[in-house]
Image (tube, rainbow, N blue to C red):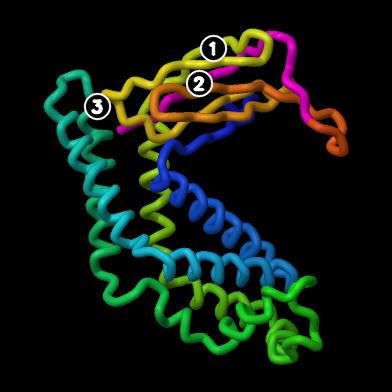
Amino acid sequence: MSEYHVYEQPLNEKVRAFLRLEKLFHQYSFHLKHGSDWNNRIAIDSILEILAFTTRSDIKLEVLKELERQYTRLERLSKRPQIDQSQLSSILKNIQKRMGELQAISGQLGQDTKNIELLNAIAQKNSVPGSICDFDLPAFKRWLMQAKELRQSHIEKWFQPFGHLDRAVQLILDILRHSAEDTDEIAENGFFQKPLDTNQAIQLLRISVHQDSDCYPEISAGKHRFSVRFMKNEDPATRPEQCQEDVNFKLKMCTI
């Protein structure tokens, strides 16, 4: 599928939250790996956003509930002879492992990171337009002037409380993304619509468009149907327009 660009549309708030967290985890990992002081700034911003996310809601409980739900649904498949029992057993063991890791965390997720004085100071200054300049927070400038290895070790320690959440969310989304097969579809004159089976809990739509296409999908979904309108925008300064030609694409309706 490397020759395709994939666009995803969550169909409930739970999956929407998991996708936002996944984006923050990937953003953190990318900038931690590169390690310049500018990368460190963004890695710290990612940690602060994850912390704000987990503070606003009991995300640990939501993730545990989803892992339990997926485990129950997948366990039922073990009774079907056509299922690869070895692969299924591996997935079930992985779910159990992630559940155990989260259940072992006592108290609020990320509480130790929340108490870091420097991170609190950065969070307070981040609302200022232009973000943090050296004169806003000299302590942060001094920290950024320390050796790369020391800065990396600090950042990894601050992220550590979210490591189990990262792996659990990724497992949930991996299972969901592999829960269906692609179908070949055509959007006539750039428009496609399909009803949603209310007996199936479709949680995620994945639209794959060939990389040579200059169209991209705008997806909207309701309770009973969803539509895909393929747009093109050769000049970002102008308003996008709907593609007038037929567009071939792949559709995956993920449910578990």
Q: Residue at x 42, y 25 (%)?
A: 253
Do callouts 2 and 3 mark residues in contact (Cβ within 8 Å)? no
- Work out whether residue 6 or residue 55 is closer to the camera in this orientation and state it: 55
Give the amino acid at mark 2.
Leu
Alpha carbon distance from label 2 to label 1:
7 Å
Q: Nearer the viewer, mark 1 or mark 3?
A: 1
Give the image location of residue 202, x and y in percent: 37, 30
Image quadrant holding the N terminus, namely top right
Alpha carbon distance from label 1 to label 3:
28 Å
* Residue 253 is a magenta residue: yes
Do callouts 2 and 1 mark residues in contact (Cβ within 8 Å)? yes
SS state under label 3: loop
In the picture, the disc for residue 251 is 2
Q: Which residue is mark 1?
A: 185
Mark 2, other Cα within 10 Å: few <14 / some 14–19 / many ≥20: many
SS state under label 2: strand
Please give the range of residues in magenta: 240-256
Mark 1, other Cα within 10 Å: few <14 / some 14–19 / many ≥20: few
Which quadrant holds residue 112?
bottom left
Give the amino acid at mark 3.
Asp
Which quadrant holds residue 78?
top left
Taking 237 as reference, is 85 left or right? left
Q: Earlier in the sequence, mark 2 or mark 3?
A: 3
Taking 106 as reference, is 41 left or right? right
Do callouts 1 and 3 mark residues in contact (Cβ within 8 Å)? no
Give the amino acid at mark 1.
Glu
Q: Residue at x 22, y 48 (%)?
A: 68
